[in-house]
Amino acid sequence: MTDILIREVDDAIAERLRQIAVERNWPVNQVILHALRVALGLGGEELVRRDRQDIAHLRGTWNPGETAAFREALSAFEHVDGRPLFSDGTKPAPETELQRAASRRRK
């Protein structure tokens, strides 16, 4: 195998290489070789097989409407009997439509 020296690697690239190495628990050299292999179209898929239990690839897949609906649904758990479940001493948030509907059902 041939050794290659790469000079003048900027800080952003070096930091990203380190981050990937930590995330995958790989040596930095292996991260660089893998990046080169993939960039040059030489494969490398066997190096990136994901653990079947890993759900990290799902992050960031909600659209804004889904995110809003999820947050709205979670807000129902923030109040019990019309009072905040948790309080940090700040003014409570205005009642949401979901909370008003739940309150009407209790009456």
Image (cartoon, grey):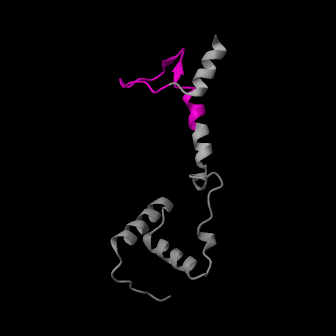
Q: How many marks?
A: 0
Residue 83, magenta (yes or no)? yes
**With respect to residue 53, does 46 lie above or below?**
below
User: In x, y percent, where is residue 87?
Assistant: 41, 23
Q: Is residue 76 left or right of residue 11?
A: right
Q: Which segment did they paint magenta?
A: 71-94
**In the depicted structure, whether residue 89 falls above or below residue 21:** above
The reply to whether the magenta stretch includes residue 3 is: no
Residue at point 56% right, 82% down? Answer: 40
Q: Position of residue 23 (x, y in %)?
A: 48, 59
Please state the horizontal and vertical placement of residue 67, each as a whole percent of the image. Answer: 58, 43
Q: Quadrant of the C terminus?
A: top right
Residue 47 position (above or below residue 89): below
Residue 105 image point, x, y percent? 66, 16
Q: Residue furthest top?
A: 107
Q: Quadrant of residue 75?
A: top right
Q: Residue at x 62, y 77 (%)?
A: 43
